[in-house]
Amino acid sequence: MKMSRLHVKDFRNFKELNIEFANRLNIFIGDNGQGKSNLLEAIALLALNDSFRYADNDKLISIGQNSALVEGLLDRNGLDYKVKMQILKSRKNVTWNEKKVTQGNVREHFSCVVFSPESLSFIKEAHDERRTLIDEALVSIDPGSAHLVTDFRKALKTRNKVLKDYLTEESDKNTSLSVLESLNPLYLKLSAELTLRRIKLLKHMMSPIQEAMRAISKSPVDILVEYRISGTNYLDSAMSASFEKIYDALFQRQVELHVAELSSGTSLVGPHKHEIVFLYNQKDSRFYCSQGQQRALILSFKMAQIVYYQKVHEAYPILLLDDVLSELDFVKRGALIEFLQKIKTQIFLTTTDLHLPEELRMEESKVFVVKEGFIA
Ligand SMILES: Nc1ncnc2c1ncn2[C@@H]1O[C@H](COP(=O)(O)OP(=O)(O)OP(=O)(O)O)[C@@H](O)[C@H]1O
Ligand SMILES: [Mg+2]
């Protein structure tokens, strides 16, 4: 899958723009604040539905306008597909070859992996960010998981509402307790299923992450990922995770924390509480790694995601790299370029640096100079 054309209208600082892309490498060059990341954001929006910069709809629409349009022409094995997104302040309307679709349908055909300065928060911040990282990777590799992620979030929201009602006596306490009891089996089922899929994904990705990290650091760095449920690491090689085992562990924990859940008015058991830790030479990367090491780690994760995606789908997702080269040291930059040369996918890259490394040269590439919302 490749994106051959992009059309945007009233999107961020672009009044209207039509671009024809190269099959392999597309570079957006320009000074700060000209619109380079905005273009990557437009491409990613079509694949992911959401902005990788966590922008609400009204931030995406040009100031003073009521709606924006982002349209991409995709090419898969010589066949054209048109994906179109109309962004209104209250919602996004997506069509695939002029037919209205949900984002799940788009993901089945069009996948992208993004590395941006925002990606660093996946390593730096609290566990919530890493859970999001894993769920995003899960949905990108297996679009069918999107329903599971959404259903779990809905069940959690409902369960939290019931617990809160119990606490604030918004409804009769006995009624709240019986609603809770009837909700629990579905909640635990969704929790166990999502947990199992996360664990399986991380197991598959572990050695690609280690390999990518070794390649990018050019040194024997030891990377381990831990998935902790109530302090137990389910990625430990001695641990065999099955649906039943996880369901039982969550059920047991829910019984133990029943009183605590009632008195806190919130769900204390489930995948929204699980901890994901990246260990860098046996130490928690969140507190131990330098900025550059954290950058290399998240880049390795993204590289591993691409490698694993290719293994499952026998095709590559497109790759969006926002401002990645400037922050990497010489060795890591060289290793990244080597990786980019190896993966046969379409790449979009932003940079402020007019002097691109020689090694980055590829056949079928284009350079776009971005200036004040135009391509110069
Ligand atoms: N909704 C909007 N309407 C109009 N302009 C916007 C909107 N949102 C952002 N902008 C403008 O877009 C520009 C930022 O674009 P972008 O983030 O793509 O910059 P960039 O070229 O990636 O810069 P850098 O090199 O600093 O990352 C800013 O000038 C900003 O004012
Ligand atoms: Mg930018």
Image: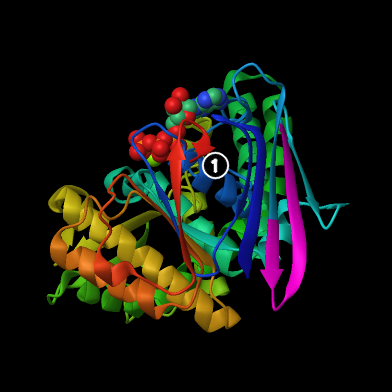
On the rendered image, what quadrant is the N terminus found in?
bottom right
Element assignment for label 1: loop
Give coordinates of residue 333: x percent, y percent: 22, 64
Q: Quadrant of residue 304?
A: bottom left
Image check: 135 left or right of 342? right
Asked whether residue 282 is in view, the answer is: no
Q: Quadrant of residue 51?
A: top right
Give the magenta range: 73-87
Q: Could you say which is closer to the camera, residue 170 or residue 241?
A: 241
Give the residue displayed 48% in from the left and 41% down from the top: 376
Give the residue displayed 64% in from the left and 62% down from the top: 4
Image check: 128 left or right of 333? right
Give coordinates of residue 225: x percent, y percent: 30, 67
Residue 85 included in the magenta stretch of the image: yes
Give the residue displayed 58% in from the left and 44% down from the top: 42
Asked whether residue 289 is in view, the answer is: yes
What is the magenta segment's predominant secondary structure? strand
Residue 267 included in the magenta stretch of the image: no
Give the residue displayed 62% in from the left and 45% down from the top: 153
Disc 1 crowd rating (10 Å Cα; few below 14, some 14-19, many 20+) is: many
The three-letter amino acid code for the residue at tag 1 is Ser
